[in-house]
Image (cartoon, rainbow, N blue to C red):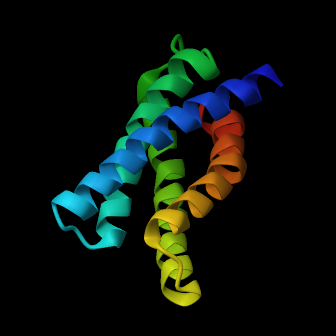
Amino acid sequence: MATFLKAQVASLSASIFDFLTTLVCTQYLHFWYVLGSATGTTVGGIINFSMGRHWVFGAAHKRVHHQILKYIMVWGGNLLLTTSGVYLVTHYLNINYIISKIIVTCTVGVTYNYLMQKKFVFA
């Protein structure tokens, strides 16, 4: 349970940077919301990898190259799920992209990301 809670703290921390990046990209740099969301997901992914490796799963002693390759594969799935989810929820349910991003990111983070990091990336 402690690992799950630490993973959620890391996910929340990464999500804060993800959302801030998304907002800056869309509101100030005028990116299309899907591109802004993808950029935010990238920033959040970098932060989440670092926190997962060093703090959540205590896997800093393992080879970083293997972890990075595994994480990139998992992160690619995350990027696809999050970006397409934000588009689908925003476009078809006519919900503001910020609310869509919150819904999709939380759902993907608690399910897909946690399981894939625990069982595959940092195992």
Q: Is residue 59 visible?
A: no
Q: Residue at x 75, y 30 (%)?
A: 4
Q: Is residue 25 left or right of residue 95?
A: left
29 or 48, which lies in front? 29
- Quadrant of image for the C terminus: top right
Q: Which quarter of the picture shows residue 55?
A: top right
Measured along the vertical axis of the image, is residue 45 above or below residue 63?
A: below
Q: From this viewpoint, which residue is outermost toward the bottom?
A: 92
Q: Going by the picture, which residue comes out furthest to the left?
A: 29
Residue 12 on image: x %, y %: 56, 37
Q: Left or right: 51 with respect to 115?
A: left
> From the viewer's perspective, is residue 34 above or below residue 74?
below
Question: At 72% across and 37% down in the image, what residue appears?
Answer: 119
Q: Position of residue 108 (x, y in %)?
A: 63, 56
99 above or below 116?
below
Q: Position of residue 51 (x, y in %)?
A: 50, 24
Q: Is residue 81 visible?
A: yes
